[in-house]
Image: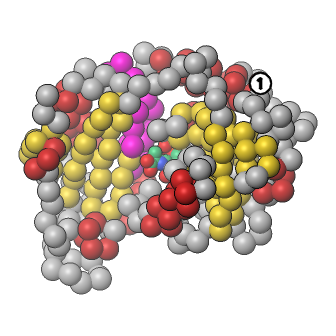
């Protein structure tokens, strides 16, 4: 079956999907994106992703390429044409095509592209194997709260992790505190059994999975707090994990060369994995098929 991409109003074979060389996303990374998981034909937390998209666009003063309703229809159509039931939808909006000039163009239409691919959700009973993370300096710009396509530090960090045989790199701020991973939010469970993730202080992306997991922790009566934590604290934590659209809830069992506790997925992490699996499978939410 031919993969289909959406490019500025057209559904085209994926291998032929292309944008103009003067698209400002290509030249200036002047654009934003979202990655949304789809379970059994339904977008997981679709409304949350679109709300964050609206915020990212507003922060960068990029116009919506179409109404929100129309965008949701294109999302459904991309999924339908690719017959994806469980997978990832990627959507990117840039300020559009204009002769190269740093300042915003007087007139340009925002550009929209979308792709989708299959990605099976692996049930936590099968997938409680943990991953390693390395720690690296957070060298990003001061607006990582915007989901912009400007991801070079994240790319370099993830590459460094891969070269070190690790899954992720946790980025560290000037005060020795963990901000987040290159494509996921970072969490620990303290010796007192408290679930901790950094508060939304402008130094992290407010992950939609992060928000879902916080809500699950709240509704299940777990003790949790949103605050920064240091690398030192993470290395002596009882448990650690990462959350994100493409990694769901993933146990972290090693930070640099230090195993987290006994080096196995901890009980609270497993609980949250199960709660999140149930959340993903909920029939609620917007969307496709
Ligand atoms: N990454 N932090 C960063 C820097 C991210 O890039 C992401 C997501 C997250 C988690 O956010 P969410 O739970 O909304 O996926 C946190 C996506 C998946 C990506 O770039 O592929």
Classify 232 as above or below 285: below
Residue at 79 percent of width and 49 percent of height: 258
**Which quarter of the figure has residue 180?**
bottom right
Residue that carries the numbered disc 1 in the rendered image: 267
Residue 134 appearing in the image? yes
Q: Quadrant of the C terminus?
A: top left
How far across and down, in percent of the image, does residue 209 sit? 54, 37
- Using the image as rendered, state which of residue 16 and residue 72 is in the foreground: 16
Would you identify the image quadrant in which residue 288 lies? top left
Could you say where residue 38 lies in the image, as x and y percent from the top left? 37, 28
Q: Nearer the viewer, residue 202 or 171?
A: 171
Which stretch is magenta?
35-53
Percent x, y of residue 46? 40, 34
The answer as to whether callout 1 falls within 8 Å of ligand 1 is no
Asked whether residue 227 appears in the rendered view, the answer is no
- Placement of the N terminus among the 4 image quadrants: top left
Residue 226 position within the rendered picture, expressed as x and y whole percent measured from the top left: 73, 46
Task: Tell me where residue 261 sits by quadrant.
Answer: top right
> Neighbour class for label 1 at 10 Å: few (<14), some, many (≥20)?
few
Residue 233 left/right relative to 135: right
Q: Is residue 33 left or right of residue 73?
A: right
**In the displayed structure, would residue 249 be above or below residue 258?**
above
In the rendered structure, the answer to whether residue 230 lies left or right of residue 22 reads right
Specify the farthest residue to the right.
192
Count of numbered circles in the view: 1
Q: Nearer the viewer, residue 271 or 60?
A: 271
In reply to whether residue 40 is colored magenta, the answer given is yes
Residue depicted at 90% across the width and 38% down the height = 191
The residue located at (65%, 50%) in the rendering is: 133
Question: Could you say whether the residue bearing mark 1 is in a helix, strand or loop?
Answer: helix
């Amino acid at each position: 079956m031919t993969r289909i991409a959406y490019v500025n109003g057209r559904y085209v074979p994926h291998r032929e999907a292309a944008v103009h060389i003067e698209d400002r996303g290509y030249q200036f990374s002047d654009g934003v994106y979202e990655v949304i998981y789809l379970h059994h034909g339904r977008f997981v937390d679709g409304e949350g992703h679109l709300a964050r998209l609206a915020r990212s666009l507003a922060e960068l003063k990029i116009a919506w390429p179409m109404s929100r309703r129309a965008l949701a229809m294109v999302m459904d159509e991309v999924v339908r044409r690719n017959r994806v039931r469980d997978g990832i939808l990627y959507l990117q909006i840039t300020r559009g095509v204009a002769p190269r000039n740093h300042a915003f163009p007087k007139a340009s239409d925002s550009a929209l592209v979308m792709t989708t691919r299959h990605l099976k959700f692996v049930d936590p009973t099968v997938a409680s194997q943990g991953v390693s993370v390395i720690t690296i300096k957070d060298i990003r710009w001061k607006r990582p709260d915007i989901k912009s396509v400007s991801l070079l530090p994240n790319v370099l960090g993830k590459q460094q992790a891969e070269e070190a045989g690790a899954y992720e790199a946790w980025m560290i701020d000037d005060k020795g505190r963990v901000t987040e991973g290159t494509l996921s939010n970072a969490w620990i469970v303290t010796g007192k059994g408290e679930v901790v993730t950094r508060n939304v202080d402008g130094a992290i992306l407010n992950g939609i999975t992060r928000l879902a997991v916080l809500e699950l922790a709240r509704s299940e009566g777990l003790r949790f707090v949103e605050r920064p934590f240091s690398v030192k604290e993470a290395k002596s934590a009882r448990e650690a994990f990462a959350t994100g659209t493409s990694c769901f809830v993933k146990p972290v069992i090693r930070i640099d060369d230090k195993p987290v506790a006994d080096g196995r997925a901890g009980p609270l992490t497993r609980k949250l994995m199960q709660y999140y699996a149930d959340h993903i499978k909920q029939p609620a939410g917007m969307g496709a098929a």
